[in-house]
C-alpha cells in the first residue's frame, strides 16, 4: 500500500470565546468553541474525500486547519511524509504551492480590481514559477482549459463582468495553475446556479485526473458528495461520526445522524420502507458540548450509555467506521 498523501491525526481547533470586560474583571475563565475536536483521517493520492455535516459542525475550520491557514490547537498534519504541523512560514512555503483551497463564494475570493487573466497568472509570479510573459501565456491556456473562451477576450475582463459560474471557473483556474497535489474545495458549488453545478464538478474532476490530485471536498449537500467523493466523512459538532466508501455509507449508513441526513434528501434516500429517523432540534453550540455521545440529545435511539460514554470509531464494514453505541445494521 502506498503512503497516503495527507494524514491528519487527532486534529483539534478551539477558538477562545470573547469575554466581556466584566467577565474578564471577575476572572471568569476563558471558554472555548471546540470547532474541531479531535479528528483523524487520511487521503490517498487522487482520492476525493467528501466532508459533510450540518452548518457549524466544523467543516470549514477542519479544511482550513489542515492547510494551516488556521493554526491547530492540537494534533498532527502529515503531508507527503512531512509533518507540517509546526513548520515555520518559510518552511511552509513550498507546501503552499502543493496545497490549494477553493472557497464557496466566487464573488469575494477575487479582487474586483484585478483582471481575471492577471489573477490566474499571479500565483505563478508569487511562487517564482514563471516570468511575466510566460505567466500570461500559461494563464491564457488555463482560461481556455476552464472553458472561458475566447481566452484573449476573457483575460482582460474584471470579475464584475462575469457570472457566478464563470467566476468560480476563474477561481478554479487560479488554484489549478500551480498544479496542486491537494485541494480543499469548501462548498465550491454551493453558491452556483444549480444548472451550472454539474459542469463545475466535471471541471474539478478533470483536474483530478490530469494531476492525480487529491481533494477534501466540503459540502453540506450529500447529493453533491455522492457525485464526486470516493469516500465520505460525516462530522457532527467537531467530531467524525462516520467515515467510509461513498456507496457503502449512502446505502448502509450506520450512524443515526448519517441516516437522517440521507433520508432528508429525496433523490438519494432509499425507496425501501426503512424506519424514518427523525432528528429534532438544532446543532447545540460548540461551547457546551453534550456529555457522552454529543449527538445524544437529538438522537431517537439514545439511552443511558449514550448520555454517559463517548463512542469511539469502530469498523462496521470494510473501511467503514462509525462512532455510535447502537449502530444501525
Ligand atoms: N474564527 C472563529 N472564531 C470563533 N469561532 C469560530 C471561528 N470560526 C468558526 N467558529 C465556530 O466554530 C464552529 C464551526 O464553524 P465552521 O465554520 O467550521 O462550520 P461549518 O461546518 O463550515 O459550517 P457551514 O456549513 O455553515 O459553513 C461554529 O460554532 C463557528 O461559530
Ligand atoms: Mg463552512
Image (spheres, rainbow, N blue to C red):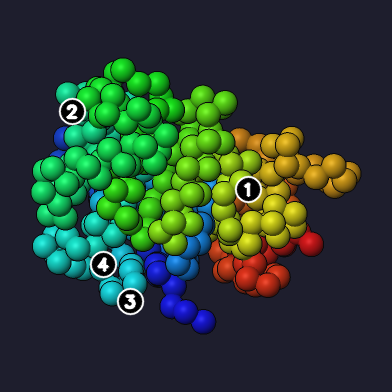
Residue at image x 42%, y 46%? 185
> Do labels 3 and 1 touch, CB within 8 Å?
no
- When the figure is inspected, residue 238 is found, relative to residue 75, above or below; the finding is above
Q: Residues within 10 Å of mark 1 (few under 14, many from 20)?
A: some
Residue beneath disc 4: 85
Q: Which mark is residue 226?
A: 1
Q: Earlier in the sequence, mark 2 or mark 1?
A: 2
How packed mark 4 is, by other alpha carbons closer than 10 Å (few <14, some 14-19, many 20 or more), is many
Q: Which mark is residue 81?
A: 3
Q: What is the C-alpha distance between the residues marked 3 and 2?
A: 37 Å
- Tag 4's secondary structure? loop
Q: Is residue 86 above or below residue 229?
A: below
In primary-sequence order, the first of circles 2 and 4 is 4
The x, y position of residue 34, in whole percent, is 38, 52
For label 1, the SS is helix
Q: Position of residue 293 (x, y in %)?
A: 58, 58
In this figure, which residue is indicated by the disc labeled 2? Answer: 114
The reply, left or right, for residue 78 in relation to residue 128 is right
- State the image quarter where residue 210 is shown: bottom left
Front tag of 3 and 2: 2
Who comes first in sequence, dot 4 or dot 1?
A: 4
Q: Nearer the viewer, residue 220 or 304?
A: 220
Q: Tag 1 or tag 3, which sits nearer the N-term?
A: 3
Amino acid at each position: 500500500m502506498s503512503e497516503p498523501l495527507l494524514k491528519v491525526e487527532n486534529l483539534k481547533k478551539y477558538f477562545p470565546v470573547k469575554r466581556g470586560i466584566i467577565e474578564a474583571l471577575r476572572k471568569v475563565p476563558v471558554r472555548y468553541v471546540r470547532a474541531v475536536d479531535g479528528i483523524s483521517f487520511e487521503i490517498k493520492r487522487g482520492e476525493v474525500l467528501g466532508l459533510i455535516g450540518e452548518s457549524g459542525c466544523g467543516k470549514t475550520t477542519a479544511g482550513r486547519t489542515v492547510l494551516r491557514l488556521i493554526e491547530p490547537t492540537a494534533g498532527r498534519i502529515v503531508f507527503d511524509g512531512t509533518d507540517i504541523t509546526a513548520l515555520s512560514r518559510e518552511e511552509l512555503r513550498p507546501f503552499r504551492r502543493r496545497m490549494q483551497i477553493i472557497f464557496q463564494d466566487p464573488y469575494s475570493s477575487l479582487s474586483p480590481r484585478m483582471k481575471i487573466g492577471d489573477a490566474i497568472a499571479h500565483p505563478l509570479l508569487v511562487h517564482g514559477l514563471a516570468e511575466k510573459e510566460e505567466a500570461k501565456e500559461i494563464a491564457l491556456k488555463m482560461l481556455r482549459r476552464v472553458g472561458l473562451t475566447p481566452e484573449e477576450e476573457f483575460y482582460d475582463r474584471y470579475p464584475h463582468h462575469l457570472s457566478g459560474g464563470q467566476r468560480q471557473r476563474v477561481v478554479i483556474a487560479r488554484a489549478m495553475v500551480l498544479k496542486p497535489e491537494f485541494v480543499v474545495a469548501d462548498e465550491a458549488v454551493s453558491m452556483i446556479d444549480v444548472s451550472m453545478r454539474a459542469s463545475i464538478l466535471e471541471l474539478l474532476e478533470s483536474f483530478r485526473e490530469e494531476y492525480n490530485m487529491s481533494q477534501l471536498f466540503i459540502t453540506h449537500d450529500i447529493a453533491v458528495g455522492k457525485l464526486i467523493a470516493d469516500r465520505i466523512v460525516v462530522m457532527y459538532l467537531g467530531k467524525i461520526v462516520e467515515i467510509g466508501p461513498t456507496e457503502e455509507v449512502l446505502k448502509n449508513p450506520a450512524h443515526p445522524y448519517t441516516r437522517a441526513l440521507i433520508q432528508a434528501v429525496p433523490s438519494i434516500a432509499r425507496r425501501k420502507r426503512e424506519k424514518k429517523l427523525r432528528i429534532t432540534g438544532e446543532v447545540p453550540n460548540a461551547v457546551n458540548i453534550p456529555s457522552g455521545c454529543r449527538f445524544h440529545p437529538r438522537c431517537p435511539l439514545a439511552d443511558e450509555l449514550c448520555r454517559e460514554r463517548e463512542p469511539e470509531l469502530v469498523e462496521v464494514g470494510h473501511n467503514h467506521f462509525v462512532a455510535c453505541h447502537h449502530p444501525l445494521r
